[in-house]
Amino acid sequence: MVPELPPLPALTRAEGEFVDAYLAVVDLLGRINPARTEHTYGALRAAQALVGRAAALRDALDLMHARGEIEVHAETLARALRVLDGERRSGRVTVPRMPAG
């Protein structure tokens, strides 16, 4: 039985797009990470896709700003990121630890 995830916090449409676009960028950066990738072709494809996802991230932030959403509610968005597995997904962007020994 799969454990039930906590519900996403209430987000505006633009905040939801911001979180989704941010996680898409993080996923692509994880695929590009030279310390974790194994093949140049997959990293190349991720790098090519990164341009479009970065534009979507910019557009989400632009929409928030245009609608008067001038503050980023970091605590609420962090909760949304945790529900959407953001901690694991962002971990692929880091450099792995050196093996002990």
Image (spheres, helix red, strand yellow):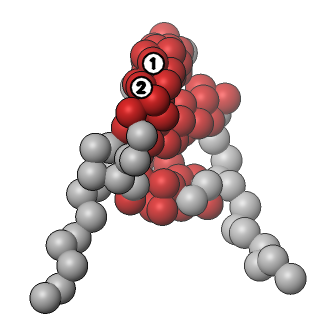
Residue 24 at x, y percent in the picture: 53, 36
Q: How many marks?
A: 2
| Label 2, label 1: how far apart the Cα atoms are | 6 Å
Q: Position of residue 2 (x, y in %)?
A: 81, 77
Q: Mark 2 or 1, which is nearer the eye?
A: 2
Residue at (67, 47) in percent of width and height: 10
The residue beneath circle 2 is 44
* Quadrant for the C terminus in the image: bottom left
Give the residue type that dot 1 points to.
Gln
Question: Could you tell me the amino acid type at mark 2?
Answer: Leu
Eyeballing the image, is 25 above or below 88?
above
Q: Position of residue 73 (x, y in %)?
A: 44, 44
Task: Examine the image and state in which quarter residue 71 appears.
Answer: top left
Tell me if residue 76 can be seen: no
Residue located beneath label 1 in the image: 48
Q: Is residue 83 above or below residue 37?
A: below
Q: Residues within 10 Å of mark 1 (few under 14, many from 20)?
A: few
Q: Which mark is residue 8?
A: none
In this view, the residue farthest toward the bottom is 101
CB under 8 Å between callouts 2 and 1?
yes
* Relative to 4, 62 lies left or right: left
- Compared to residue 31, the image places residue 17 above or below, namely above
Q: Residue furthest right?
A: 1
Kind of element beneath mark 1: helix
Q: Residue at x 40, y 47 (%)?
A: 38
Q: Residues within 10 Å of mark 2 (few under 14, many from 20)?
A: few
Q: Tell me if residue 39 can be seen.
A: yes
In the depicted view, which residue is nearer to us: 41 or 14?
41
* Residue in the image at 24% along x and 57% along y: 95
